[in-house]
Image (cartoon, rainbow, N blue to C red):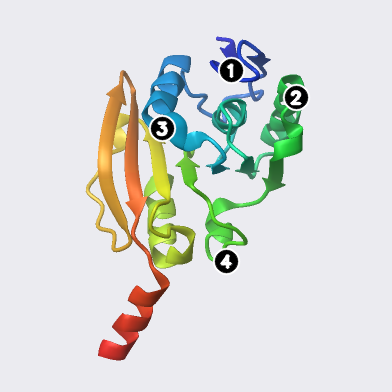
Amino acid sequence: MPMRVISGSAKGRQLKLVPGDSTRPIMDRVKEALFNILGRDILEATFLDMFAGTGSVGIEALSRGAAKAVFYDIEGRAIQTIQDNLKTTKLSEHAVIRRYDVLSLLKQKPTEHYDFIYIAPPQYKGMWLQVLKALDANPAWIPVGTLVIVQIDPSEEEPVELKWLTPTDQRRYGNTLLWFFEGQYEERSIRTEEKSE
């Protein structure tokens, strides 16, 4: 099924799919619902698209006025597809593409602040939970105000206990669940804890 940019500067542009079945493209109606929820907060935002696949979500963010999108994927075919889709949409100038393992990345210190972090890993492997726990273990990625969005199949949902991420909303669209978490980390909260020990 063809994918497209729904709104903004690249509205209507068709996007390529990643060859094979290693990615799970987001349905247009789910993507539209997501960006209706984010609303004007996307303007001038920095968007991190993890397990980016086609790049469709980060590209939609750029099309709607995000200042920058950073795309991570470990698959070479996904990286090529993202590059092609950014050329098609003429949004390459505001994008950074990196071929890297997300869980390895999250062990490092972030090099910049992200307003939105989108997580849509391969299905049925529990990777979404690993990524949330990795963020929680390295909370410099999730300062107060950062919104983390997880895209999973509803059957993958399970309770998760996190210290620095608070669940704020959940929306189901057929066989897609979007789960929203807000970052709660402040530098001083770590220092306060250290003093009280």
Neighbor class of circle 1 (other Cα within 10 Å; few <14, some 14-19, many 20+) is many
Instruction: Residue 136: give x, y in percent of width and height.
Output: 38, 61
Q: Earlier in the sequence, mark 2 or mark 4?
A: 2
Secondary-structure class at tag 1: loop
Q: Nearer the viewer, mark 3 or mark 1?
A: 3
Instruction: Name above or below for residue 40 compared with residue 128.
Output: above
Q: Earlier in the sequence, mark 3 or mark 1?
A: 1
Kind of residue sitting beneath label 1: Val
**Mark 3 to mark 4: distance in Å?**
27 Å
Instruction: Residue 45: give x, y in percent of width and height.
Output: 54, 42
Q: Nearer the viewer, mark 2 or mark 4?
A: 2
Camera-nearest residue between 185 and 175? 185
Q: Earlier in the sequence, mark 3 or mark 4?
A: 3
Question: Residue sitting at 27 percent across and 34 percent down?
Answer: 170
Instruction: Residue 69: give x, y in percent of width and height.
Output: 62, 40
Instruction: Residue 165: give x, y in percent of width and height.
Output: 32, 55
**Mark 4 to mark 1: distance in Å?**
32 Å
Where does label 2 land, which residue? 90
Kind of residue sitting beneath label 4: Gln
Question: Residue sitting at 77 percent across and 25 percent down?
Answer: 87
Q: Nearer the viewer, mark 3 or mark 4?
A: 3
Secondary-structure class at tag 4: loop
**Mark 3 to mark 1: distance in Å?**
16 Å
**Mark 3 to mark 2: distance in Å?**
23 Å
- Give the residue furthest to the left: 159
Q: Does residue 124 appear in this view? A: no
Q: Is residue 44 left or right of residue 136?
A: right
Where does label 1 land, which residue? 5
Where does label 4 land, which residue? 108
Image quadrant occupied by the C terminus: bottom left
